[in-house]
Image: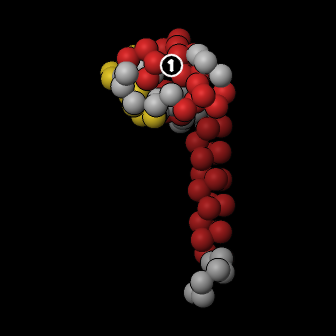
Amino acid sequence: MKAGRFSPSLLAGSACAARFAAKQAFSGHLTFASVYPKWILFETNGMNDETFGAGTERSTVQALLDKGYELSYGGGFRDTGKRDTVLRRKW
């Protein structure tokens, strides 16, 4: 395959994967927990607060805690001084 060209088999594979996922979702094989990641790791170095306004990192972490995640490390640079945040799904 030449650089810059799409492979029809790649596209067919993507379509097949999408059909499989849709079939699983409608047949009840996907559970609520299976669509949420077990672990979430993201950078909280203060840039989000600088870009989107003070409190952005705190509210992001709090929203994930409210959804059933627990804080494993960090929690926002302004609050903890740690530049990464790691959360784990409790359910």
Q: Quadrant of residue 23?
A: top right
Is 82 in front, or is 28? 82
Q: Quadrant of the C terminus?
A: top left
* Residue name at image x 65 percent, y 69 percent: 11
Give coordinates of residue 57: x percent, y percent: 54, 22
**Type of residue at label 1?**
Val
Categorize mark 1 by other alpha carbons within 10 Å: few (<14), some (14-19), many (20+). many
Report if residue 90 is visible in the image.
no
Give coordinates of residue 71: x percent, y percent: 38, 18
Give coordinates of residue 15: x percent, y percent: 66, 61
Look at the picture and state if 58 lies above or below 2. Answer: above
Report if residue 86 is visible in the image.
yes
* Residue name at image x 37 percent, y 21 percent: 81
| Label 1: which secondary element | helix
> Which residue is label 1 attached to?
61
Q: Quadrant of residue 88?
A: top left
